[in-house]
Image: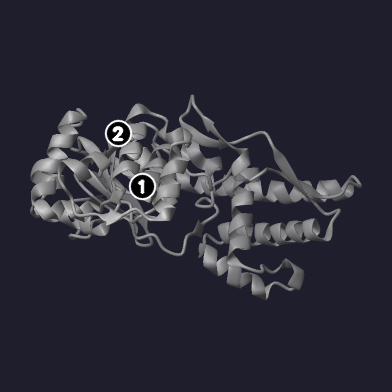
Amino acid sequence: MSTESDTPQKEEEARQQLIDLAAEFYDQFAEGDVPRMTLPTRTKSNIEYDEDKDVWVYGDRTSTRSAKSVSGAEKLLKATYTIDFLAQQLEEDRSSTLRELYYLSESWDLEEAQFNSQDESNDLVEDLEIVSEVTREDFHMRPEESGATLMGPLQIREQTRRGEREIHCQEDVGEGGYQIPNNPDTIEFLDHDADFVLCVETGGMRDRLVENGFDEEYNVIVVHLKGQPARATRRITKRLHDELDLPVVVFTDGDPWSYRIYGSVAYGSIKSAHLSEYLATPEAEFVGIRPADIVEYDLPTDPLGDSDINALESELEDPRFQTEFWREQIELQLDIGKKAEQQALASRGLDFVTDTYLPERLTEMDVI
């Protein structure tokens, strides 16, 4: 379990890893070698599905950033400037956003060290995560915004600028819930009365569950994913499962893009394959909306577009969906040619989702 007392040590370790990385470039210079940095090749063809761990990982292919070329030298120069900035940020106990880093580079004295786009600066931060084996959260780098929340019978301790505070994530928060911080490893779990965790894709459905008192009636921690979940959301979900031994179920819309939201929670994403074991919860189960629900409940639907069809056909080949359940559901969806949102359950009444749909499905899954 992470505690606040671990944080200064982790920050110092992160700073030292950055300094060691910069020192490697210096040593290469001193030994007469061309400076270089070797990384896993970050392409889809070098992503492998680890069947033992049930997560995406990088394969064996690597690429080298070398100062032998102008392009490679510029990338190493940008890495050196970024390392210097991050190390200073940690020393001063400050933080910044990925967006701020992009703009900040415009003040660097060498024009060649400045970033041409935010994608370039984002990719470099990910490169530094990989080679240093330190997460960007420990570098004090934040995404521009997250805003994901949780609501449920969980008591935590967190650090604020005014000191530590204890929060009960039902009794001490408003209807919006407890906002998940950028680095959930700084939270200490104190106590809970939860029986499981329910990750919900949309804000409308999350609000419906809370308004109907679903979190209280079933002792559930409701995590709002806000669409494709941020790293902080996936990390706290994994911690709730691993440290509190709570089952995790994922409730999304009934379309191929939402199935991938479930896949990112359960198995990790291609973009963050270097952090899959840190972020993914392979034991997470999918509760719906299933294509079978569209048929069974005669839900209001939209027709599948060409991109939906292509995505579903791609998922039939995706290792994350190679089970009898997923093959049946995807093939059924292609057959009926329809997709449905979570809120489509309201066609059966505003209380249908909390009184009937979820209780029946979760009972079938032996979650409640």
- Compared across the picture, whether 42 is left or right of 93 comes to right
| Tag 2 residue | 244
| SS class, disc 1 | loop
Q: Most extreme residue toward the top, as rendered?
A: 52
Image height of 105 relative to 35, above or below: below
Report x, y in % for residue 333: 31, 43
Label 2 and label 1: CA atoms lie apart by 13 Å
Q: Most extreme residue toward the front, as rendered?
A: 335
Q: Give the image quarter of residue 189.
A: top left
Query: 351 or 71, which is in the foreground?
Result: 351
Report x, y in % for residue 322: 42, 30
Query: 109 or 256, which is in the foreground?
Result: 256
Label 2 with label 1: CB-CB less than 8 Å: no
Q: Give the image quarter of residue 1.
A: top left
Query: 168 or 287, which is in the foreground?
Result: 287
Quarter containing the C terminus: top left
- Compared across the picture, whether 159 is left or right of 93 comes to left
Q: Which mark is residue 187?
A: 1
Q: Residue 265 carries which label?
A: none
Report x, y in % for residue 122: 58, 59
| SS class, disc 2 | helix
- Compared across the picture, whether 53 is left or right of 27 comes to left
Residue drawn at (16%, 40%) of the image: 296
Residue drawn at (42%, 54%) of the image: 306
Residue 110 can be seen, yes or no: no
Report x, y in % for residue 344: 19, 54
Under mark 2, the amino acid is Leu
Q: Which of marks 2 and 1 is in front?
A: 2
Image height of 242 relative to 19, above or below: above
The image's colouring method is one colour
